Image: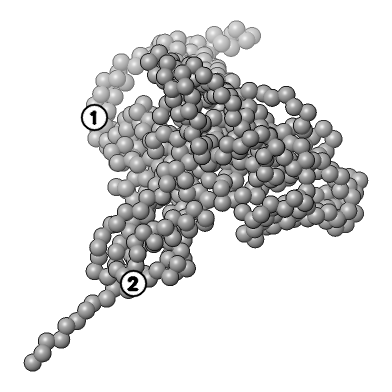
């Protein structure tokens, strides 16, 4: 990825009456007023892939929202699970708890606002090389996930604009021995994303090492955060996703 | 007057015991049975079928429909007093003749029933039948045959007996699949360097190739002119067409850009001295 430019467009809602360009990493976005009550949308990425849309309007202006969305759509929607492999594993001694902040990938959604409705106009990733799949488990019965190596950072302020959002992970160890955790796999559709300026954060997750009968598992659940940051619209359809029973390494 | 009309019908005997009136009543029973069967099937399709798998819903719908019609027929025969015993005797002899003539039809029917019970694959699955040379998406398994839409867009009807007795390779019952390719590099080239170049190209240019399990590189053969490397890449099961047909091109371009030679077959000829 090229060095991030501090002058990138912020996330948020924009009213467009005339021509307007947006400046995002590796992405060119242009809105053009091409006629009475008609706008055009044009997007070009670093690999010269282009997307064009005509947008008819009622009153010669459009309102759009640029927001971070879950990283599930590029290159195609195949799963609702996110596989975070921590660059540095976390060691938890017995009956201990810890809290970390980790980088999680995002994609960017462009939404057309019509009254109360927010309709998905386009989506893309500013970091296509790291938008890849991984398998948790065996090829016969494993779970396909979006995979990323996740760096542990200090706080929510470390979010890279248009590339990632920060997630707080609350670890716990209810086992009677110390244990390292190097990965967490969870249905990311349970986590909302919030943005402020060009930074983004996810809802938190709890990841607790437990013993269920004789099996040691890492039990993962979403945990809503309270924040005054704006909540991103959902890009994907709502669907019920089963939680995984993660084994312990 | 109406009563006299029906009395008149009751006196018209077609065969022994079967009058025109009983035939009329039988017709009404069959018509009502048909209406009930259609209504039940409609209600089933609307309210219960969406909760079942496509195959089960289709088969259960057929079972309900034909079950009600058969019951109507039995009610019809019992109320009209039609004696089917003669038909059964004649049917016994006739059945043997028909049995021989429709052996394959019955075989397909029985195979269809077993396919519906065993369910080796389900509607919408991608299947490969190596013995029949057929690959594609299974559209349905009906009473006598299965239909497969091949990847070239054509639809092939396969008799259930052939389908049931074939080796069936399911291409969509696991979350991921693997594609393979073999490339040869010159003996003078650094094998680890070539593997590194190919790995980076797959990572960069193949968004559907899985990071985990990572692509695997195996020395396949020390061949006559080249060191052959087998490249194994995992991908989501739906995206075979995004990986397998493109893999060799990506590898070839990567080796070209890395200045790694892909040798032509070559032979060293020693000339004997006189």
Does residue B18 show up?
A: no
Q: Is residue A66 above or below residue B61?
A: below
Alpha-carbon distance for marks 1 and 2?
A: 69 Å
Extreme-bottom residue of the structure: B274
Q: Residue at x 56, y 51 (%)?
A: A129
Q: Report the chain holding disc 1.
A: B
Outermost residue on the left side: it is: B274
Q: Earlier in the sequence, mark 1 or mark 2?
A: 1
Instruction: Decide: is A20 above or below B30.
Output: below
* Relative vertical location of residue A84 with respect to residue B270 in this rendering, above or below: above
Residue at position x 52%, y 56% in the image: B205
Crowding near the residue tagged with mark 2, few <14, some 14–19, many ≥20 C-alpha atoms within 10 Å: few
Which part of the image, by quadrant, shows the N terminus of chain B? top right
Residue position for label 1 = B96
Nearest the eye: A90 or B11? A90
Picture coordinates of residue A83, whole percent (x, y):
52, 36
In the picture provided, is B226 more to the left or to the right than B70? Answer: left
Would you call the spot at circle 1 few (<14 residues within 10 Å), some (14-19), or many (20 or more)?
few
Q: Residue at x 24, y 69 (%)?
A: B224
């Amino acid at each position: 990825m090229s060095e991030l430019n501090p002058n990138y467009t912020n996330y948020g809602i924009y009213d467009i009456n005339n021509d307007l360009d947006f400046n995002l990493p590796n992405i060119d976005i242009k809105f053009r007023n091409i006629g009475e009550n008609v706008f055009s949308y044009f997007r070009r990425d670093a690999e010269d892939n282009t997307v064009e849309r005509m947008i008819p309007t009622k009153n010669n202006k459009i309102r759009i929202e640029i927001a971070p969305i879950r990283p599930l759509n590029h290159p195609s929607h195949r799963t609702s699970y996110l596989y975070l492999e921590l660059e540095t594993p976390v060691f938890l001694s017995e009956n201990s708890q810890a809290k970390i902040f980790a980088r999680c990938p995002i994609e960017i959604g462009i939404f057309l606002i019509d009254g109360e409705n927010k309709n998905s106009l386009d989506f893309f990733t500013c970091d296509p090389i790291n938008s890849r799949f991984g398998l948790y488990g065996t090829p016969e019965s494993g779970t396909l996930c979006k995979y990323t190596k996740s760096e542990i950072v200090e706080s929510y302020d470390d979010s890279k604009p248009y590339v990632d959002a920060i997630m707080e992970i609350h670890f716990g160890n209810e086992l009677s021995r110390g244990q390292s955790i190097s990965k967490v796999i969870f249905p990311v559709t349970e986590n909302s994303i919030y943005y402020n300026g060009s930074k983004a954060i996810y809802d938190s997750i709890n990841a607790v090492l437990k013993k269920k009968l004789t099996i040691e598992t890492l039990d993962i659940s979403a945990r809503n955060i309270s924040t005054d940051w704006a909540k991103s619209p959902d890009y994907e359809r709502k669907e019920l996703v089963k939680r995984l029973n993660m084994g312990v390494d | 007057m109406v009563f006299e009309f029906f009395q008149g019908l009751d006196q018209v005997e077609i065969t022994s015991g079967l009058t025109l009136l009983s035939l009329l009543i039988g017709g009404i029973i069959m018509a009502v049975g048909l209406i009930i069967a259609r209504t039940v099937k409609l209600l089933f399709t609307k309210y219960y079928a969406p909760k079942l798998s496509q195959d089960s819903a289709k088969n259960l719908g057929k079972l309900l429909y034909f079950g009600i019609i058969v019951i109507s027929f039995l009610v019809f025969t019992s109320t009209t007093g039609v004696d089917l015993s003669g038909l059964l005797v004649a049917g016994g002899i006739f059945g043997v003749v028909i049995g021989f003539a429709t052996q394959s039809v019955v075989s397909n029917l029985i195979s269809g029933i077993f396919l519906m019970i065993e369910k080796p694959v389900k509607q919408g699955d991608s299947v490969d039948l190596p013995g029949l040379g057929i690959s594609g998406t299974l559209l349905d398994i009906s009473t006598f045959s299965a239909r497969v839409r091949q990847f070239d867009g054509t639809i092939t009807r396969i008799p259930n007996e052939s389908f049931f007795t074939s080796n069936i390779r399911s291409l969509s019952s696991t979350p991921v699949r693997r594609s393979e390719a073999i490339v040869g590099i010159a003996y003078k080239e650094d094998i680890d360097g070539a593997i590194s170049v190919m790995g980076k190209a797959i990572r960069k240019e193949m968004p559907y190739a899985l990071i985990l399990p990572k692509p695997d590189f195996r020395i396949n053969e020390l061949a006559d002119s080249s060191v052959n490397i087998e490249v194994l890449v995992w991908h989501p099961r739906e995206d075979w067409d995004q990986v397998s047909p493109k893999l060799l091109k990506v590898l070839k371009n990567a080796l070209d850009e890395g200045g790694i030679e892909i040798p032509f077959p070559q032979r060293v000829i020693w000339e004997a001295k006189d």
